Structure formats: C-alpha cells, structure tokens
Image (spheres, grey):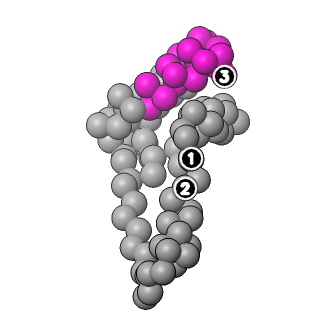
Amino acid sequence: MIDSSDPELTRTIVHKRAGHLPSPRSARQYRNLLLDAGFRDVTVEVHTGVFTDGSFLPVLTRLAQVCREHGAITPAQADAWTTDQRKRARADRLFTV
C-alpha cells in the first residue's frame, strides 16, 4: 500500500512490480500449504512494516525505475511519482505499508 497523489499510476507501478515476482501471491497460501503437508494447529502471525519517513524513499525510487525500464510507465511518470513521494517525505506525509 503506497499513498500517492496519483492512485492510478501507483496501482500500475505496484502491479507491474508484482508481475515480475515468481509467485507474488504465495504468502496467501502458506497456511494451507502447511495444512496440506500434514502440519496441525497451524497459526499465522502477521507483522506489518509501516514507513512514514524518508527511509523508504530508495525502495520507492527503485520501484519507479524498474517500471520505467520495463516500459510500464514513461520517464515523465516515473519522475512525477518519485517527486511526489519525496515531497510527501519532506512534509511528513509519506505512508507505505
């Protein structure tokens, strides 16, 4: 989850990145895979990272770069999106999960 001024572009970026992972939805299957393998009393614990400062900007910048390199977004879109994220970080308005 990434807050931005352009939700459509953010959706494109996130989906393009997920499309390059071997199994982007595999974590959804972890519990059932363990149950299918014979494990009993399987519990799930979720730990979510929330980033609200500039420490996450390199990840966001790289995300836009990869999408640009693969033609999912234009260079202008990548620049606008990363500029928006930098402004959010400077204004204490960055929010990623």
Q: x%, y% of residue 92?
A: 37, 41
Furthest residue toward front: 38
Q: Which residue is mark 3?
A: 72
Residue 14: in sight, yes or no?
no
Vertical side of 32 occupied by 4: above or below:
above
Q: Is residue 95 magenta?
A: no
Residue 8 lies left or right of residue 27; in this view the side is right
CA gap between label 2 and label 3 equals 23 Å
Residue 59: in sight, yes or no?
yes
The magenta segment is 60-79
Amino acid marked by disc 3: Ala
Residue 7 lies left or right of residue 37; in this view the side is right
Q: Are marks 2 and 3 in contact (CB under 8 Å)?
A: no
Q: Residues within 10 Å of mark 2 (few under 14, many from 20)?
A: few
CA gap between label 1 and label 3 equals 19 Å
Q: Are marks 2 and 1 in contact (CB under 8 Å)?
A: yes
- Helix, strand or loop: magenta stretch: helix
At x 36%, y 55%, the residue is 49
